[in-house]
Amino acid sequence: MLNLAARSTLRQSRLHLTNLQNLSALAPKRTIITLNDHKYTAHATARGQGRNGEVESDGDGKLSLRLASPKALGGKGDGQNPEQLFAMGYAACFLGALQMVAGKAGKKDAVKNAAIHARVHLGEPKDIGGFGIAVDIKAEGVEDEALIQAAHENCPYSRALTHGAVVNVSKV
């Protein structure tokens, strides 16, 4: 039989555990997006010295770029960097999502002069080491907030950053 002090400690532990379980139930659940199939796959290869190397894609419209670290990170800034490429892809993808949702809503004219501005910030995350990104998306020439939000909910880049994406890493 447990003495009074042991029973009190056990009761406190159970209450603490119950409180933790209640808090975890309130925490937002993050789901990872998994694909049913692959409609298109882009290929890219980086070589050389990472941020100061080269990157190229193959397939439709082969693209080859020289990379350079930005001046803000101590580089020469005389080439492209991964954040610029990410911002360009995100802006184009978001614009496509905006045009798609506007078309489905019968509001194509509401986005005919749209331009998407993407800013990708590189910095240190608050809770883990290394680097992380933050993104600002601004829609120019669109007054309908609901269309902008619908584009965010449908854009694959937004979905990947909001919900997560499967990332498979292996050696060749």
Image (spheres, helix red, strand yellow):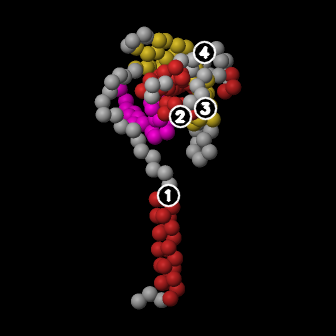
Q: Nearer the viewer, residue 90 or 46?
A: 90
**Screen quadrant of the N terminus:** bottom left
Residue 20 position in % (x across, y down) = 50, 64
Q: Nearer the viewer, residue 105 or 30?
A: 105
Frontmost of labels 1 and 4 is 1
Q: Residue, x 44% and y 20% (percent of image)? A: 45
Q: Between marks 2 and 1, how big is the CA–CA gap?
A: 27 Å
According to the picture, the residue beneath numbered tag 2 turns out to be 146
Where disc 4 sits, the SS reads: loop
Mark 4 is surrounded, within 10 Å at the Cα level, by few (under 14), some (14 to 19) or many (20 or more) other residues, namely: some
**Label 1 close to label 4 by CB (< 8 Å):** no
Q: Name which residue type carries label 2.
A: Ala
Q: Residue, x 35% and y 26% (percent of image)? A: 172
State the mark number for residue 136.
Answer: 3
Residue 2 position in % (x across, y down) = 44, 87
Q: Residue, x 40% and y 20% (percent of image)? A: 43
Q: Which residues are magenta?
A: 153-172
Query: Mark 1 or mark 4, which has the lower sequence index?
Result: 1
Left or right side of 31 for 48: right
Q: Between marks 3 and 2, how big is the CA–CA gap?
A: 17 Å
Query: Mark 3 or mark 2, which has the lower sequence index?
Result: 3
Q: Name which residue type carries label 4.
A: Gly
According to the picture, the residue beneath numbered tag 4 turns out to be 79
Frontmost of labels 4 and 3 is 3
Please give the count of numbered marks on the rendered protein.
4
Query: Mark 4 or mark 2, which has the lower sequence index?
Result: 4
Q: Between marks 1 and 4, how big is the CA–CA gap?
A: 46 Å
